[in-house]
Amino acid sequence: MYYWSTTMRMDSLKEDFIRKHNINKVYLRYFDVVVASDGNVMPNATITFDNPSGTTDASPDDSSAVFSFTCPLPDTLEVVPVVFIVNNCMKRNVSQLPEMILKRVMQMTETHDVQNVREIQIDCDWTVSTQQTFFNFMEQLHKLTKEAGLRLSATIRLHQLMLPPPSCDEGVLMVYNTGDMTQLNGRNPILDSRDAMPYLKHLKKYKLPLSAAYPIYRWQLLYRGGRFVGVIHHDGEYPVLDNDSIYDCQVDIDTILKVKDEITKINPRTNNRIILFDLNNHNISRFNDNDYEKIYQQ
């Protein structure tokens, strides 16, 4: 499972899902990297951990106590810290970024007692114009992670299958965000098999071991006068006018299984490890246990 939130919080629903479906690996978004107002790249939206482990310098009943917060994921799980890098960062000077990212990831891992970290993942929607800078960045980071005894992986978008892979040990194929949410064209922008299939033909010759990640999330898309306004993440985020349209966008189980079967036909090794995006209570309540087992079945 991916866990893509700014707060790491566990509860009985998530714990039951992990146990029922034998989840053994969680890709945990640690922080984003963005371009700051001064033009430099910097971390943003760092995850917080909702699991107080006690006090660092005071008794438990002291109201002035400073609590340390540890990762609440079960110790049985392998945890992969994920860093999301906004693509325009690759138009800046990122020569120091590999070292900065590795240092920050390792500090967070130690501070919050995150167990079983053997791999770091980079998520970036790089394009042809930023490809060379991103590949140089990944090559530097790959050397550093090897020296630290860690593996390095990267997310791979469907459109990136047509291009060479970056330097890393393995990739995760993002089988979602296949369409244009700004266009009302009758296709599901999260995943429509008609949008995915043209890219999958490149999967057989792609020179990087891949796993596959499938979507179980939902978007609420707001349109005004036929034009895209934005994604509604919470109530009140946008004023909704009388003539506005809200498109409740989610992928049905048949579409996921159809695309998964097509990937198996082209390159069955891609489905040797199946990941779902992402672990929150609404998403994991969408399908029944049998449907999730159909997705996870290899």
Image: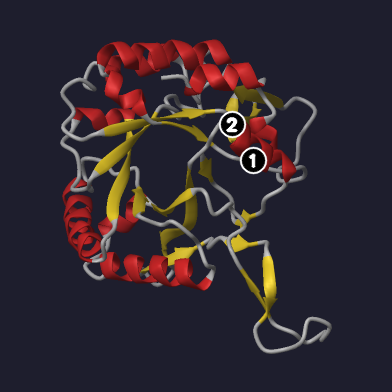
47 to 173, vertically: above or below: below
Q: Secondary structure at mark 1?
A: loop
The answer to whether one can see residue 61 in this image is yes
Q: Amino acid at mark 1?
A: Asn
Give the colour scheme of this rendering: secondary structure
**Residue 10 place in picture, x, y as percent:** 67, 50
Is label 1 in contact with label 2 (beta carbons under 8 Å)? Answer: yes
- Residue sitting at x 36%, y 24%: 271
Label 1 to label 2, Cα distance in Å?
A: 9 Å
**Residue 103 place in picture, x, y as percent:** 35, 71
Looking at marks 1 and 2 on the same chain, the residue that comes earlier in the sequence is marked by: 2
Q: Nearer the viewer, residue 251 or 8?
A: 8
Q: In screen coordinates, is 191 left or right of 67?
A: left
Disc sitting over residue 27 in the figure:
none
Outermost residue toward the front in this view: 76
**Residue 142 place in picture, x, y as percent:** 21, 56
Q: In screen coordinates, is 195 left or right of 58?
A: left
- Residue sitting at x 17%, y 55%: 139
186 to 244, vertically: above or below: above
Q: Amino acid at mark 2?
A: Tyr
Q: Residues within 10 Å of mark 1 (few under 14, many from 20)?
A: many
Q: Secondary structure at mark 2?
A: loop
Identify the residue under disc 2.
Answer: 217
Quadrant of residue 202 within the rendered picture:
top left
Q: In screen coordinates, is 110 left or right of 292?
A: left
Q: Nearer the viewer, residue 187 or 2?
A: 2
Identify the residue under disc 1.
Answer: 280
- Residue sitting at x 67%, y 20%: 288
